[in-house]
Amino acid sequence: MKGIIGKKIGMTSIFDSSGKQTACTIIEAGPCVVTQVKTIESDGYNALSLSLGDKKEKHSTKSEVNHYAKAQTAPKKFTKEFRNYSLEKNIGETITLDIFAEGDSVEVVGTTKGKGFQGVVKRHGFHGVGQQSHGQHDRQRAPGSLGNSSDAARVMKGMKMAGRMGNDRVKLKGLKVVKIFAEKNYILVSGSVPGYNGSIVLIQK
Amino acid sequence: MNAIAFVHEQLTGKKDFPKFKAGDNITVNYKIIEGSKERIQSFKGDVIKKQGNGATASFTVRKISDGIGVERVFPFFSPNVESIVMNKTGNVRRAKLFYQRKRSGKSARIREKRQAVAEVAK
C-alpha cells in the first residue's frame, strides 16, 4: 500500500477530449514527512507514520517536539499511520504526489460531515408512517413498530433508531486520479470525497 | 491565489467568445457526434441565464421552435462549443430572464439595445 495525507479543497469539474464533463474534488496533498518507521521487530507490525502541516513549538508538548525532532522536522499538526507501505522510506524522507499517476484508481478515506441527532427518515432512509390524513395525526416521520409482541418481548439488538448521524470514517474505493499539479501539490480525484472543505483525507492505493 | 482559482486557470483554455450577457441573441455552434461522424450544429436564441464561474460556468439559450420553447444549457468551457456568434444586444433589466418562459409572441420579444456607432465597430 502507498498513501499520502491531504486536505480537501473543494470541487470543480473537468472536460475530457470528447466533451464529457466529470465532477472532481481538489485535494491538496503532501508533502508528507516520514516521522516514524515501524517494523515487526520493534513494534510487531510494519507501518510508516506520515505527518503533514507545521505546528508552532509553543503549541506542542515537549514529547511531541522530541518525537518529531527524530525526523529533523518541526512538530506536525496531523500524523497518520499507513500499514505495510510498499515503498522503502527512511525516517525524515518526504513523500509527495509522485507516488500516484494520472489514471490510477485510488481509495480516499475521510470523516463525513456531522449531521447531529437525526430521525430515522434521514438517518436510515425509512419512509415514515402512513399518510397525511386518515387519522394519522402527527406520525409522518415516525419509525413505526420496533418489533414483535409478547414472543420476544424485547427490542432486537441493532434496531435502527434515531441518533447521532455523520462524523463517521468513510472509505471511498475506486476513485480515479484525474489530474495532478505536482508543483502545487494538488490532486484531482473523480467524484466527491467525504468531509467538509478543509478536512483531512487520506489518499491511498 | 487560492487553490480553486489556480486549478480553474489551468483547466480552462483561452476561449475567444464575444462577451455576451442575458438578453443577447446569439448563435452557438457546437459539435455533435453521430456514430463516427462529427458535424457542427447551430442553436440560435436569446441568452436567459449565465451561471457559475471558472471552469464550471454555463449559460442557457432559449428559442422558440415551431411555437414551442426550447432551452439548452451549454457549459462555457466545453470543447464541444465550437464558436459563438453575437447577433443582437438585448436591452433587459435583469440577469436571469426566466419571465420569458411565461411569455409568447409579441411580449416575448427582447428590445435591441441602441449603441453608438463606434461601439458597434468594436
Image (tube, rainbow, N blue to C red):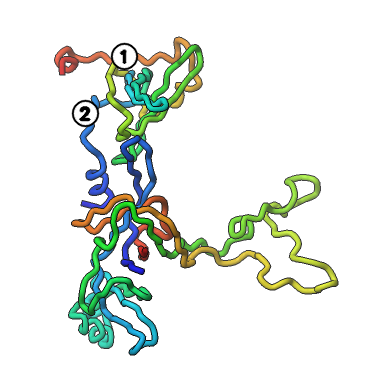
Residue that appears at 29% across and 60% down: A100
Q: From the top left corner, tell me how far across and down residue B121 is, in percent.
A: 16, 15
The mark nearer the N terminus, 1 or 2, is 2
Q: From the top left corner, tell me how far across and down residue A35 is, in percent.
A: 26, 78
Residue B112's tag is 1
Please, what is the three-letter code of the amino acid marked with disc 2? Asp
Element type at marker 1?
loop
Query: For mark 2, what is the residue?
Result: B16
Residue that appears at 26% across and 53% down: A180
Please, what is the three-letter code of the amino acid marked with disc 1? Glu
Residue with the most extreme right position: A150
Residue that appears at 36% across and 73% down: A82
Q: From the top left corner, tell me how far across and down residue A84 is, in percent.
A: 36, 75
Q: Crowdedness of circle 2 by 10 Å Cα count: few (<14), some, many (20+)?
A: few
| Quadrant in the picture for the C terminus of chain A | bottom left
- The reply to whether the C-beta atoms of the residues labelled 1 and 2 are less than 8 Å apart is no
Element type at marker 2?
loop
